[in-house]
Amino acid sequence: MPSALPYVLAATFLVPGILALLIRDPCRSRVVGFGGGAVASFLGLVLTLVGAMREAPVRIPLPAPVPWAASELFLDGLSAFFLVLVFFIGFLVSVYAIGYMKEFDARRRGQAAPLLLNLLLLSMAFVVSAGDMLSFLLGWEAMSLASYFLVVLNHEKREARQAGLIYLIATHIGTGGILLAFLFLVQTTGSFSFNGFATVPISDPAILCATFWFALLGFGTKAGVFPFHIWLPYAHPEAPSPVSAVMSGVMIKMGIYGIVRFLFYLLPSPPASFGATLLALGLLSGVFGVLYAIVQHDLKRLLAFHSVENIGIILIGIGAASLCQATGRPDAARLLLVGGLFHVLNHATFKALLFLGAGAVLQGTHTRNIEKLGGLMRGMPLTGVAFLAGSLAISAVPPFNGFASEFTIYRGLWAAVGGAGTGGIYLAAMAGLALIGGLAVVCFVKVVGTVFLGNARSAQASAARDPSVAMEFPMGTLALFCLGLGVFPSIVLDRLMEITSFLSSAGGPASVAVPAAGGKPFTVAIALAIAIGGLWLLRTFLLRRNGQRAGGTWGCGFPYATPRMQYTASSFADPILHVFRGILRPHTTRTERLSGRFLLEVEHETHFHDLLENGLYLPVYRLFVRAAFQARRLHPGYIHLYLGYILGAVVLLLVFFH
Amino acid sequence: MKFVAHITLFILLGPLLVGVVRKTKAFLSCRQGASVFQPFLDLWKLFRRGIVRSTSASWVFDLSAPVVLGASLVLAAATPLWSREVPLPMHFILFLYLMALPRFFQTLAGLDTGSAFGGLGSSREVAVSAMAEPALILSFCGLAYLGGADTVSGMVAVVPPGRIPWRPEVILLAGTMFLLLLAENARIPVDDPATHLELTMIHEAMVLDHAGVDLAMIQLASGVRLVLFSAIVSGILFPQALSLPTFLAIPAAVVKVVLSGALIGAVEAGMARMKLSRVASYLLIATVLAAIALSVRYAG
């Protein structure tokens, strides 16, 4: 691979972005900026598929930013896999943004969006191909800042600014963790490059543990793993929809990339406790994520909580893989890691699709509150079909791709159970995964049912129409991939088996990605297609013979049923809420307005407070604020006092350092 | 040929099983009851009727009945009814997750008509199924252990040689699967298929706006699913019947299905429907039982 390619790619991302700033006409600026991003992403995708993936590992030296450490790009199979993710989603989202970002035309800062989005994509590509610590951190910071500015693109809104602040704090705490983890490695190995890190194992268990926990804090915050997830449900809804799609589909996966890179490449032979920790956090993220998602009414906030859930599923795969590796079950470990990584790609596909669909709904109806929607399948049939495909995929319904990866994880867990003694933890993981899957079905039946089916609950909902082709094309493509990757999973699974070949046991490739008997997704898909198609024809034939007439929905014999009498999303979620009320903690307030003895109005409000947010983060935040107020007394504004500080500091230095 | 026989048997046994359940229930409550073949007549009638399609409904509603029946038949093709050889061997995880496909479309169709009843039924249906998932996975894991195979047909059908057939974990798993059969097929004590009060229904409320052909397909699918679960439960308890030669095995399968119909009918006659909020405890019991069955394997 020629070493000039990365520079060419960077230029194709950045030049259109800068041009977009200069072009006066907002429409042309959009086309040039996002269109340039789409072209660059497509170029990157082709280069990765035909170049990097075949030739891996590829090394490209970079000019060193500092004299004492060399910089390079190092592309192995794992990097190439994540590059495909970045460029694939980047391409489709850029195309979508050409149509969607119209709403920012009137605003001056909207013109910065193409540059920021292209920068975000480029920096993510840089993160996954970085071969040393400094380039990695450089890319990581660029990614964090670009995404921060994209979140606050709606800066007129207070919520967006607040979300941006929470995100900025979270991401920097995370960067701090990553920096510390890297510094431990540098201290042990004396090298700055990833290859150098991998050669010298950390012998001191305390340092190894500290490295792992700081890396987990850093990457876990970015990924939205359970205790560190609180920024996600703020940042994803406030960002413009294409940005949410990139953030949720790709950017949080950078955290997963970091965890995999550390656990399987940089820290040779990590102890079993690391894998067990990740597995436990994965289960917690999965269950909490989906439970909080079920009670949301804000479409994008709901999807954000589902990202927490899916990151949980990915972590179950990766954590169990590490655990299996540590306990000497390499075949199960390989299957689990393959499943986790496959879910990374699948989640990117369906979550990007769902966020893009949510964007189309938002553009058509100007509301994210699903209680005000309904019946959109009539006005927005294409968006509806795509969203339904994404919903089936995220609910892990066969033959869609969400199932294909969860199935691989399940098979890995099942293979791990088969070993000696400690199978209980894997069985618990299987039961947890099953619960998560069942609850995801609840959530997406609720979403599709209240948003797209039934009758419109508001005037905006009944007036909504399908968006422009630029927005339909990415959604349609992603929907096809949701089905395609589910029916033909071996296209990706075979590649992933090669990437994870370092985990295989000495006896050769005992495990295969697609089960030989009883699990061929293609056979099942064909069987389903034949059965459902045949019955559809039978139904059509019988209806033509027997007749069909239109009539109102049965209303117990009462006429004048209105759309308000439909089942609401809150009612739909109520049985689950009732069972899990100990975790979800609904706070209900009821205010009545009386006139004499007559009840005029009742207001009923239910809120859900994130357990961690109120129990952990807010108290810590308040403590910090209080400490800051105390510290403020130290600088009251008297110049004499400041001179005194300087004098005191000099005296102290003299005392301590002679 | 065998494939056609397998599916046909499922389709024929479904209404028969429903008829047997109703007849048993009637008998135990000292009523005459309709003939066990009444469900066939009902289906025949429905297939010849036209439908009234709600003006609120979209194509999802139209597609729901074929998806529900089609997916149930695919599931049936993987279930051993009279022989270990099934037309479509299926991994047990795939089998369990494929059950979500008909549920997804059925519950969406419930919401599609814009009726509060449909929403009510759908909401309860998905909640009950979600809470049943861990128990289902764990008991299938237990079965896969016992049978030493990953496919549904392989795992219910094998008794390890030299072992007594009704070991404690076998009985526990069969019991768990029976609890799940009642929950997943909308039977008492989780749901009451015979109630006339919409507010207390789950499954029936969801299909309230389906008529004619659609309703026939959905009822047929319910029957097929009931046979499917009965086949698994009886397969656990009497795996020997699956090794018989075909001319004996098919009557044996019919007898097994009729017997499980009588058992379901007896439960329905003897119990009242549970309060809906207690269903979670019921399913938790099933989960715990499955976990105990698995732990027996570890101890032994």
Image: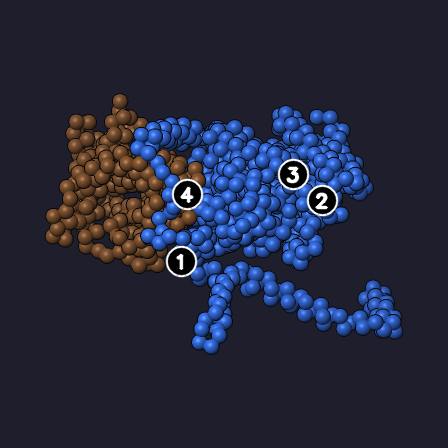
Amino acid of disc 3? Gly
- Kind of element beneath mark 1: helix
Q: Quadrant of residue B100?
A: top left
Q: Contact, CB < 8 Å: mark 1 with mark 2?
A: no
Front position among marks 4 and 3: 4
> Where does label 2 land, which residue?
A105
- Which residue was labeled with disc 3? A99
Badge 3 local density, few (<14 within 10 Å), some, or many (20+)? many
Judging by the rendered image, the residue that carries numbered circle 1 is A579
* First along the sequence among labels 3 and 1: 3
Task: Report the quarter where the N terminus of chain B lies.
Answer: top left
- The chain that hosts pointer 4 is B
For chain A, give the colour: blue
Q: CA distance from mark 2 to mark 3?
A: 11 Å
Specify the farthest residue to the bottom: A596
Q: Nearer the viewer, mark 1 or mark 2?
A: 2
- Element under label 3? helix
A36 w.r.t. B193: above or below: above
Q: Nearer the viewer, mark 1 or mark 4?
A: 4
